[in-house]
Amino acid sequence: MTTDHIAYKSFPHHRKWFNKLWLSEQLGYHCGPAGTAPSYSRYYITRPIMNLSGMSLNAKKIFIDAGDVSKVSPGHFWCERFNGCQYSVSYKFQDGHWVPFLSYQAYRDENNLYKFQKWVRTDWAIALPSWFNVLSDVDTINVEFIDNNIIEVHLRDTPDPQYNELIPIWESDQQVVDIYKELGYSYIENWDNGDGFLDNPRIGFMVK
């Protein structure tokens, strides 16, 4: 399985795509690095400019007043916050364009940016901008969206097992495994603690 760590080493000529601030700027979002301030007072998403460890580490939803540079930590950036459903879509490059072949919709508490409640397979997908074609040598990419807004690009397929429904099981909630088994789910181990930076690791999934 290809991880972000492996992809970073495998595609040195595409490393700017790991830079979420650069991507947000290319997409025309209202955003900026720590030390700059938004133009409007509202809720924003702040997170590391680059994070190869995944699991939405240190991503937060915070209210920032216009002109306030004190809310965002060095090495992080702020970006306008989008409303809507979150999707994870995998694409293959075929016949000169990106073709979606696997899509999941995410469910989670909007105030907790890492602790997903459920992923459900769906047919949702949209066409990618033509400037993504520069990644054609990667073959397979995974793109995350909020509604129609791209928020992340991974130079790999989804790292999660492919089922119709996946319910993450967190270390703090492992007592629910037996409850889900009674509802017809199976449990598979799938450990991820964000390279040791996540205090409440994901230990596996309940799947159908």
Image (cartoon, rainbow, N blue to C red):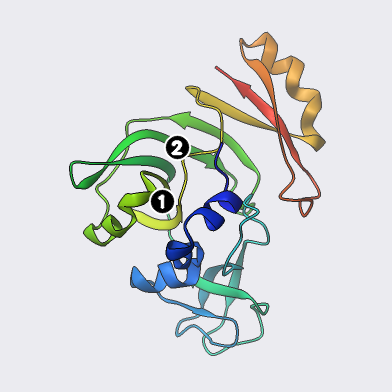
Q: Secondary structure at mark 1?
A: strand
Q: Is residue 39 visible?
A: yes
Q: Residue 122 occupies which quadrant of the picture?
A: top left
- Nearer to us in this view, 116 or 90: 90
Residue drawn 64% across and 76% down? 75
Considering the image in quadrants, where does the C terminus appear? top right
Image location of residue 82, percent across then percent down: 43, 60
* Disc 1 target residue: 145
Q: Secondary structure at mark 2?
A: strand
Image location of residue 80, percent across then percent down: 45, 69
202, above or below 194, in the image:
above
Q: Amino acid at mark 2?
A: Gln
Q: Is residue 110 visible?
A: no
Image location of residue 129, percent across then percent down: 25, 57
Image location of residue 142, percent across then percent down: 43, 45
* Disc 2 target residue: 105
- Nearer to us in this view, 83 or 105: 105
Considering the image in quadrants, where does the N terminus appear? top right
Q: Residue 140 occupies which quadrant of the picture?
A: top left
Residue drawn 42% across and 69% down? 24
Seen in the image, is 183 located left or right of residue 45?
right
- Nearer to us in this view, 89 or 157: 157
Q: Residue furthest bottom?
A: 67
Circle 1: is it few (<14), some (14-19), or many (20+) Cα within 10 Å? Answer: many
Q: Residue furthest left?
A: 95
Seen in the image, is 23 located left or right of residue 71?
left
